[in-house]
Amino acid sequence: MKRIALLGMPNTGKSTLFNRLTGAGARVGNWPGLTVELLSAKLLLAGDMVEVVDLPGIYNLHGFSEDEQVVRRFLESQPIDLIAVVLNGVQLDRQLALALQLKQLGLPMILLLNMADEAAKLGMRIDTGRLSASLGLPVHMISAKAGQGLPQAKASMEGLLRAGGDTIQANFDNFTEDHRLEQETQALLSQAVQSPLVLPRSLTERLDRYALHPWIGPPLFLLLLLGVFQAIYGLGTPLQDGMEWLLTRVKDLLLTPMLGGLPEIPRSFLAEGLYDGLGTVLSFLPIIFVFFLVMAAVEDSGYLARAAFLADALMARMGLDGRAFVLQLMGFGCNVPAIMGTRVMRSRGLRLLTMLTIPFSLCSARLQVFLFFTTAVFSPTAAPWVLFGLYLLSFAIAFLSAFLWRHRLNSHEPLLMEIPPYRMPHLGYLLAQGWRESTHFLREAGGFILLGVALVWLLTHFPFDAAPASAETLAGRLADFIAPVFDPLGIDQMLAIALLFGFVAKEIVIGALAVIYAVGPDSLDAVIAARVDWVSALSFMLFTLIYTPCVSTLAVIRQESRSLGFTLFSLGWSLGLAWVVSWAFYQTARHLS
Amino acid sequence: MIIASLLIKPSPEMTTLSIQNEFAPIRLQATVTDGPTHANLAELKAGDTGVINALGAESELRLRMHALGLLPGRTVQVIRKAPFHGPLEIRSGHTNLLIRLDEARSISLEPQS
Ligand SMILES: Nc1nc2c(ncn2[C@@H]2O[C@H](COP(=O)(O)OP(=O)(O)OP(=O)(O)O)[C@@H](O)[C@H]2O)c(=O)[nH]1
């Protein structure tokens, strides 16, 4: 099969183009260096199936970053029929040099100048004919987002693939000096690119006067955060209620009559174990969808680079930098990709310190637990504020951890990154992203959750002659055993069992509680509200926030740090901190009230 | 096709090498070759522009600077400076960049005429 590699600098729209071309789901984000794994998909071109590979963004083939090494190794080791170089047409002044460097590899090549829409808005004129003639390769202006110019680009690629002979290997031998390339770039630019001397005052500039203002910017950030979570709350909870209603109807009208003939134990396993457990988790799916939709909008808008600018001075005092702050924000979705995102950092100290803080980011799985507990225990007006408080606390814990360990894991890493213009997120893309993430959640966590609720059912029902979840069952005995640890935190035995399972994945916690109390999604909150007061509930939430998010996070920390010692340290630190914070809170609150 | 398996980890030797790199002192070319008359980027006020004379950073960072459009002879403008010795936002050509004070100090500018 023939192979096309998409290459270019970070944030030029490669992933967007890849999605456009192949219809497959690569993650797209307006954040330099987001693509850290190689994505590939098949595409029908020139009558053949062709494999398209989306390579990570690189600044320079000689570069030292992990991404740049990945790309170089890929080019050295893989046969490639065509490289499609994606540049930001607006930034040709600095990006054209990369194309010249890639041209020296001697592979068939096509040049795609993306962001045609932005170039036009700025009044830039790019003479693609001239560039094409000077470079000796096809050049097209495209807009990956709007789809403009893509048919022509595809036709060119087909032409090159047809004309191409045998697949050849990239040739790294005849590189010229970078400064020669610079002269060539300047010559080409002066021939082919016209850009107005005075740029129109852009929307980005006007917005940034507030967004990056020393005194307005930070409160605006918090306001935005609050707005985002109010939106998730406002949009998500009615959807969740609808889902709960639906699941209960299905159980009452379909499942219960169907299982009527079964003996008690398998009936209880299917209805109170699997169905209630899974159903409770499933009822959060709409919220997950809304959550990822909103996250994708924030990521795609370009605001995250502003957050890095605002936070950098503060982060520097904790041994971190603005990028670490952004990774913490991305951790709100899921900690795993955020930890992989630390690959953009070069120094080990900074990477490890950032990895230590990301697991405290309140991820979407923990969000489910908190949504559930806050709505069950607090009034509808207080609940969103409690949730917002937990988000702030998640920052505070992360900052505290970094502050305490900054000398051990220190670094002197320079910081230099692009601040892209604001871009309007594309609604179709956002919906696709929300859908992709929520189905991903189901596929990834589904197995864990299924296994988890089945196991919890067994623990709370075995031996079968004991009353479910009573002291005689396995769960009861296990709870007795761990009670000395959780009693001082005000976390009762059944909640402690749920926490034990939550170690595997937080998605299991609510499902486990549904199984433990043998109730469906619609009445679990009433049961919890009757058994747990607000002090215990908060203590439980604090512990859930701080202790290890899930086994996958541990695994990825191990993989990225390449150190078992660090992984164990991170595990121990979060467990210890969780206990101490919950204990301090619970004891203080009990004494005061 | 599992291309992701190509994500080869750098060998331990490479890692140590890069760590040494990071701690290499930043050479300020300006002070060596041209005497102290050159201002650096960090000294500009918000709104000011200057022409880059030389990049003092070590080779890895210098490559990154080149790729982001910071090259001798190019004009840069300081858009804003974050308070509390925070980073600068600068513009070079059509690219806006975030740069920390330390890195900005390593970029010397042509004398103002
Ligand atoms: N205006 C405009 N924006 C675009 C266009 N193509 C992509 N974008 C936006 O540019 C940003 C970056 O796009 P990505 O596809 O993530 O870029 P990438 O090159 O894959 O970036 P990395 O993952 O960092 O390597 C996103 O916000 C896109 O929505 C375009 O043609 N016009």
Image (tube, rainbow, N blue to C red):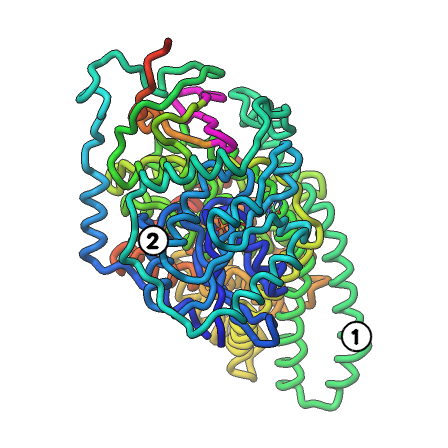
Q: Is residue A41 magenta?
A: no
The reply to whether label 2 and label 1 mark residues of one chain is yes
Identify the residue at horizontal 70%, vertical 54% (top origin).
Answer: A428
Q: Quadrant of residue A317?
A: top left
Q: Is mark 1 within 8 Å of ligand 1?
A: no
Q: What residue range appears in magenta?
A: B77-96
For the stretch drawn in magenta, the main secondary structure is: strand
Q: Position of residue A561 (x, y in %)?
A: 31, 56
Q: Position of residue A46 (x, y in %)?
A: 60, 72
Tag 2 residue = A66
Amino acid residing under circle 2 = Glu
**Mark 1 residue crowding within 10 angstroms, few (<14) / some (14–19) / many (20+):** few
Q: Give the vertical position of B110 relative to A511 (above or below).
A: above
Residue nearest the observer in this picture, A570 or A474: A570
Q: Give the vertical position of B84 relative to A519 (above or below).
A: above
Q: Position of residue A113 (x, y in %)?
A: 56, 47
Identify the residue at horizontal 48%, vertical 69% (top origin).
Answer: A164
> Is residue B83 toward the left or the right of residue A439 in the image?
left
**Mark 2 residue crowding within 10 angstroms, few (<14) / some (14–19) / many (20+):** many
| Residue A252 disc label | 1
| Residue A581 disc label | none
